[in-house]
């Protein structure tokens, strides 16, 4: 049996969706894209503050108690930090967290 590209399988399945299913999928995709953009922006801001304070990630780990590997993931937009983690990092950087709903 020949293999089919995922895109072809996906498109075939989507062609059978109702208008409501498409609307839900589009809304979910937009929501998760916004969350992803927010995580990337937060990571960039943390990295900028850290560099501005002349700290490396290990020094920030020592100040915040958050593992360097997690700091790296957050700064690269790959982590999904909790509010507590963000507060600990930003407090160590002498900053405040202002969370906005998505």
Image (cartoon, grey):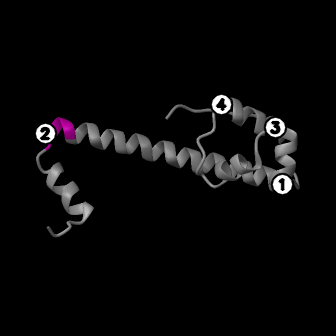
Q: Is residue 40 magenta?
A: no
Q: Position of residue 96 (x, y in %)?
A: 76, 34
Picture residue at 61% right of the left edge, 49% below the top: 41
- At which x and y percent is residue 54? 88, 55
Q: Taken as a whole, is the magenta stretch helix, strand or loop? A: helix
Label 3 and label 4: CA atoms lie apart by: 14 Å
Judge by depth and name the residue closer to the eye, 99 or 2. 2
Instruction: Say what secondary structure mark 3 lies in.
Output: loop
Q: Identify the secondary structure beneath mark 4.
A: helix
Whole-angstrom CA distance, mark 4 to mark 1, is 22 Å
The earlier-in-sequence mark between 1 and 2 is 2
Indicate which disc, 3 or 1, sits on the residue closer to the N terminus. 1
Q: Do the CB atoms of the residues marked 2 and 4 lie less than 8 Å apart?
A: no
Q: Residues within 10 Å of mark 3 (few under 14, many from 20)?
A: some
The answer to whether the residue labelled 3 contacts the one labelled 1, judged by CB atoms less than 8 Å apart, is no
Q: Label 1 vs label 2: CA separation?
A: 51 Å
Q: Which circle's residue, 2 or 4, is located before the other in the chain?
A: 2
| Residue bearing mark 1 | 52
- Circle 4 is placed at which residue position? 83
Residue furthest toward the front? 1
- Give how far across and how far down residue 2 sits, in percent: 16, 70
State the residue position of label 2.
18
- How far apart marks 2 and 4 lie (CA) works out to 37 Å
Identify which residue, 4 or 49, lies in the foreground: 4
Residue under label 3: 65
């Amino acid at each position: 049996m020949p293999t089919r590209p995922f895109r072809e399988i996906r498109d075939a399945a989507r062609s059978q969706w109702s208008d409501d299913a498409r609307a839900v999928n589009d809304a979910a995709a937009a929501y998760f894209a916004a969350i992803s953009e927010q995580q990337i922006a937060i990571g960039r801001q943390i990295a900028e503050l850290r560099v501005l304070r002349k700290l490396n990630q290990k020094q920030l780990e020592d100040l915040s108690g958050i593992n360097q590997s997690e700091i790296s993931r957050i700064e690269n937009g790959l982590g999904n930090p909790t509010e507590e983690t963000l507060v600990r990092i930003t407090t160590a950087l002498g900053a405040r967290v202002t969370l906005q709903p998505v």
